[in-house]
Image (cartoon, grey):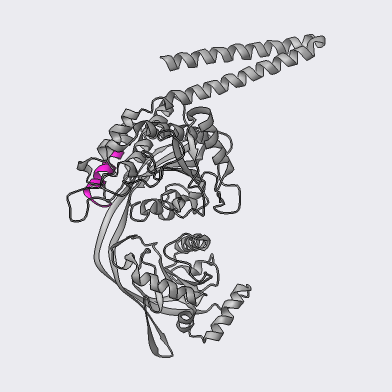
Amino acid sequence: MKFQSTIITLFFNLIILFSSTNCISQKADNQDTATRQTNRKKVEQDTLILESLSALQQSTQTYYANNIKAINLKNHIELLASESFEGRKVGERGQKMAGLYIQDFFIKNDLEPAVPTDLGKRYGQKFDVEKSKISMVTIKTEIKDKEITLKNKEDFLANPLTYLHNENELNVVLTGYSILPNEQMHGRGVALFLNTYDKEEIFYSNQDWNEKTEKQVLLAQKAGVKAVFYILTNSDNFKVNSKKLQKSEYLNEEIYTLKTEKSVGVYFLSMQTAAKLFDYSDSEWQTIEENFKENKIPSNLPYTTISIDVKKEKITDLDTENVIGFIEGTDLKEELIIISAHYDHLGKEKGHTNYFAGADDNASGVAALMELAKLFALAKKDGFSPRRSILFLTTTAEEVGMLGSSYYADIAPLFPISNVVANLNIDMIGREYTPKSKYPANDYVTIVGSDWLSPVLHQTHEQANTTFTKLNLDYTYNSKKHPEEFFYRSDQYSFAKYDIPVIFYTSPDHKDYHKTSDTAEKIDYQRVEKVTKLIFYTTWQLANQKQSPKKIEKNTFEGQN
């Protein structure tokens, strides 16, 4: 009743002001001598009208934001982090139970399903993950009636984090330094030159060229390419990475990869191996590379035919699902805001009955997303629909390589990826990070990426905080050069690589990160409430303001240095 009373009062004030303004305008026509005074009064009245409209908007936001309660967030977190959910390991029973809990909550609170099926729409976006250990990869080709066999870690490096699969008589075309947007690439392999520094690590870091190669692989994937072969122009770099791969944990542990028809295997070759594979001398190959660098592209692109044999151990196929709720907007409904949080975690400790509760990582983020979804759905029911559509995306398989968000963004977006104007990702908002922040423990949130791709997004979130929540915004980790590289370590990166503006809300590493001791009683629930309110206000502004937060600049990932 209090909220309704406030709305009624504001509407009456607006009616009075509009009526007064109209009267003043009529008098102005008949009393030329009072024009200046009348105009001044009209400006004052218009100002009051705008202020009343602003007050109405703020009052509406505040009403719904005040329904974000620590107790509700606590209930979600305690349940998701409980023993009955078994650590929410991807593909296992606990993760399935968590997904059903989120789905039931979406249904109860009138969020729309968005995943199309033959029988209508549903909330679960199913996909397959392969868990396996690579034991051997070989590439074979025939040159001048002689079979040549190349071995992984000796002649080339197979990226174990990509889906490696057998290929028989695959045509591989050399396209130089870029993927050709050409239908002729469908069903083929693509070879590309890649410049690297002597000691750059091609598997373990996110340097500038790594961002570029990922975009190239995405282009290849969309063109139906089967495999991408990067030719390292620096021979020393190939040797460095070969030694590192020999010692890598990736060769000794099971790896999770997306298993889809569109999945692309990625391989790295030395210049010498590439020359052998395409049947050129080293000097001829060097000339070809220089010509491509100078944009002297031959009319007949070099190509070769190869077969890839991948042997794997301990193959396990897992089915899993993102859980998604949707609120359709009004006049700007084609533009989409995605709120994301991963709900999977690490399961049980190997060889023990102990489980990884994952209270902060990331039951805290899921709880925030669920309460946000509930309140935006309630606001729509009350007649306050957002202008832009909002997708609430709870992802799985984040802990094993951000596979859920990659599947959504790369393989099966429910709406055109170009329609996404912002992604707000929530991952670990319930604890203070170590070493401690310079701000009070429950009065700050770490922000990463807000100014990297869109000044509008950054300004909107700063203004929402200044007007409403007044939290301390900690930008300590908001740097491309930060050694922890947090920008690349959660689901927002799956959208940022498409130049979609993002904000990553987090409180990074603490002493219980990825340990069984990340439990619900250690969560600061007042902190979670405050951060959730900030995200609510930011989302409300983004969903309703005239200006889109869509990226304006051309430079990717500028950020703070």
Residue 97: within the magenta? Answer: yes
Observer-nearest of 195 and 520 = 520
**In the figure, is residue 421 to the left or right of 89?**
right
Which image quadrant is residue 80 in? top left
Residue 32 placement (x, y as % from top left): 81, 11
Q: Which stretch appears magenta?
A: 90-104
170 shown above or below 76: below
The answer to whether residue 165 shows anywhere in this view is no
Task: Locate residue 10 relative to residue 224 in the image: left or right.
Answer: right
For residue 445, above or below residue 7: below
Residue 522: x percent and y percent?
30, 37
Q: Residue at x 49, y 14 (%)?
A: 8
Count of numbered tags: 0
- Tell me if residue 128 can be seen: yes
| Name of the residue lying farthest toward the right | 33
**Residue 338 percent across, percent down from the top left:** 44, 42
User: Residue 420: within the magenta?
Assistant: no
Whether residue 46 is situated above or below residue 332 in the rendered picture:
above
- Residue that appears at 52% across and 69% down: 197
Majority secondary structure of the magenta segment? helix
Q: Nearer the viewer, residue 512 or 325?
A: 512
Q: Quadrant of the N terminus?
A: top left
| Residue depicted at x 60% and y 77% | 290
Question: Can you name the residue that lies furthest to the bottom here?
Answer: 145
Image coords of residue 306 (percent x, y):
40, 79
* 148 over 403 or under it: above or below: below
